[in-house]
Image: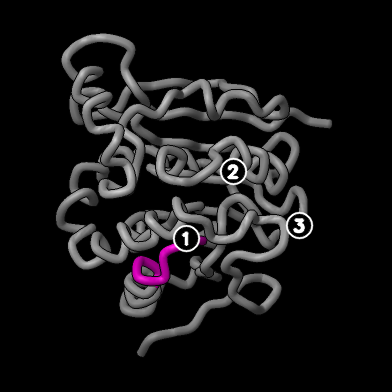
Amino acid sequence: MEIKLHTISGHEQGSGPGQGGRGVELEAIEKSYRRWAPIYDATFGRITAMGRKRAVAEVNKGRGRILELGVGTGLSLPDYAPHLEVIGVDYSEDMLAIARRRVAELGLKHVVALARMDARALDFPDGFFDCVVAMYLVSVVPEPERVMAEIARVCKPGGQVIIVNHFAREKGPLAVIERMLAPLANVLGWHPDFDRIRILKEPSLRVVEVRPMAPLSLFTFLRLVKEPR
């Protein structure tokens, strides 16, 4: 039986005041992930499996309330430790529908909410989460700088932020391929030429760990800590 999970405030959030509307880019992303949703687990989900497990293993060392931004089809949800309280958000309702089925079928009681939200305007109070996780998200969303500001806002002082993502290479054959693919970002659903510096400008977040991830160091694991006030 499928269960229905809501946001903390009891409603789902799409776009609203202060979010700049849905915009052409956000609509393109939504359409892209509508196409990806039925095959995501068997394709990109397989490629990203190692990064997801590495990120969740780090989160499982801690305690408290966890936010996973860009939860997608919920592939990572079964791996979170049962002592955690996990909330997942995504903009794609098609992806969230699969995540909800997964939670229901597996009886994942540590997943307390799944909701549709724009990552640029999260419907949570300041300092609400002990850890915020964003896997394969920051090169997908419009205005990643705003997303990082929201991540910092909802993370508790002293809390952790875990990011796994692909970042543009400065040289080599892969760098050339990334630049060639850049105009297809709306079709792919992500930006192949995304520069890591764009997410490192938030002053309250300090990088404490950087690690290349398989396959072929295609992805990077970042662990950041929110500076105490």
To which residue does mark 1 refer?
90
Q: Residues within 10 Å of mark 3 (few under 14, many from 20)?
A: few
Select label 2 or label 3 by which is in front: 2
Q: Residue drawn 68% across and 62% down? A: 123
Q: Nearer the viewer, mark 3 or mark 1?
A: 1
Instruction: Indicate the secondary structure of the residue bearing disc 2.
Output: helix
Dividing the picture into quarters, in which one does residue 20 lie? bottom right
Figure quadrant of the C terminus: top right
Please say if 42 is above or below 96: above
Residue numbers of the magenta segment: 89-96
**Residue neighbourhood size for the residue with mark 2, other residues' Cα within 10 Å, grouped as few (<14), some (14–19), many (≥20):** many
Residue found 34% across the figure and 23% down from its top? 168
Marks 1 and 2: in contact by CB < 8 Å? no
* Residue 103 x/y as whole percent: 38, 73
Give the amino acid type for the residue marked by disc 3 in the picture: Pro
Q: What kind of residue is marked 1?
A: Asp
> Residue at 32% across / 38% down in the picture?
51
Mark 3 — residue? 125
For this view, does 152 lie left or right of residue 29?
right
* Mark 2 lies on residue: 147
The amino acid beneath tag 2 is Val
Q: Residue furthest top?
A: 171
Task: Bin the neighbour count of mark 1 within 10 Å (Cα to Cα): few under 14, some 14-19, many 20 and up.
Answer: many
Q: Are marks 2 and 3 in contact (CB under 8 Å)?
A: no
Q: Where is residue 10? Give x, y as percent.
A: 66, 78
Q: Earlier in the sequence, mark 2 or mark 3?
A: 3
**Residue 227 sits in which quadrant?**
top right
Q: Quadrant of the N terminus?
A: bottom left
Q: Nearer the viewer, residue 208 or 197?
A: 197
Q: How is the image coloured?
A: one colour
- Vertical side of 136 occupied by 122: above or below: below
**Image spot of residue 176 (x, y percent):** 21, 18
